Amino acid sequence: MTERDIRYFGDPVLKSATTPVTVFDQKLKDLVEDLLDTTALPGRAGVAATQIGVSMRVFSYNVDDELGYVINPEVVETSGELREIEEGCLSVPGLWFPTPRYEHATVKGVDLRNEPITVSGSGIMAQCLQHETDHLDGYVYLDRLSKPNRREALKQVRKSDWF
């Protein structure tokens, strides 16, 4: 289909929780294809529908050469230590900050046929699953930062040429 433009921090759609998908039609299939095309670009681990301006509960991922998507994802399990991991976001370009994430995460949702799917992973995949689900709940990674890091991040956002 097509690569879609990414919305930047400050766009209200990024702070809005999405509603679950209930209609499994061509519009949804087109959205999933656009998300996959947008995520497949180099240096991208995932894209949530809100990041392309669509308030539907869908994200795509591209980690360790595994390209996929989840509709109506919910994080059902996290395990391991909660560690601060350097994290960035396409919606907050050029900025990386230590963000608390669990070492392992499992997401359950459905596919385009409304059949159950489960995606689990450790490391980057766990970080991606938590990060993208956060987007669909109306959070950006800056919301997870410690107060001092958040202050610094927002200061850098205000100085950025894209804000």
Image: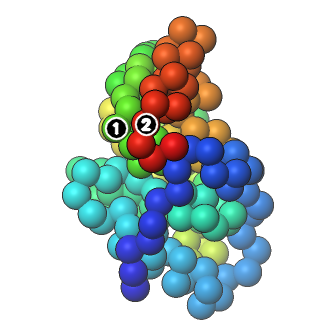
Mark 2 Cα shell of 10 Å, populated few (<14), some (14-19), many (≥20): few
Could you tell me residue 98's position as x and y percent? 41, 20
Three-letter code, disc 2: Ser
Q: Secondary structure at mark 2?
A: loop
Q: Residue extending furthest top?
A: 148
Residue denoted by label 2: 160
Q: Nearer the viewer, residue 9 or 64?
A: 9
The residue labelled by disc 1 is: 94
- The answer to whether residue 155 is visible is yes
- Residue 42 in the image: x percent, y percent? 22, 58
Q: Is residue 146 visible?
A: no
Does residue 89 sit above or below 119 in this rendering? above
User: Which residue sits at x=45%, y=47%?
Assistant: 162
The kind of residue on which mark 1 rests is: Gly
Residue located 69% across and 63% down the image: 55
* Discs 1, 2 touching: Cβ within 8 Å: yes
**75 sits to left or right of 158:** right
Q: Quadrant of residue 124?
A: top left
For the point 44% across and 78% down, the residue is 33
**Does 149 appear above or below 130?**
above
In this rendering, the label closer to the viewer, 1 or 2: 2
**Residue positioned 54% across, 77% down in the render:** 31
Q: Measured along the vertical axis of the image, is residue 6 above or below residue 123? A: below
Q: Position of residue 7 (x, y in %)?
A: 53, 57
Q: Quadrant of the N terminus?
A: bottom left
Label 1 residue SS: strand
Residue 160 drawn at (x, y percent):
43, 36
Q: Is residue 69 left or right of residue 40?
A: right
Give the mark nearer the N terminus: 1 vs 2.
1
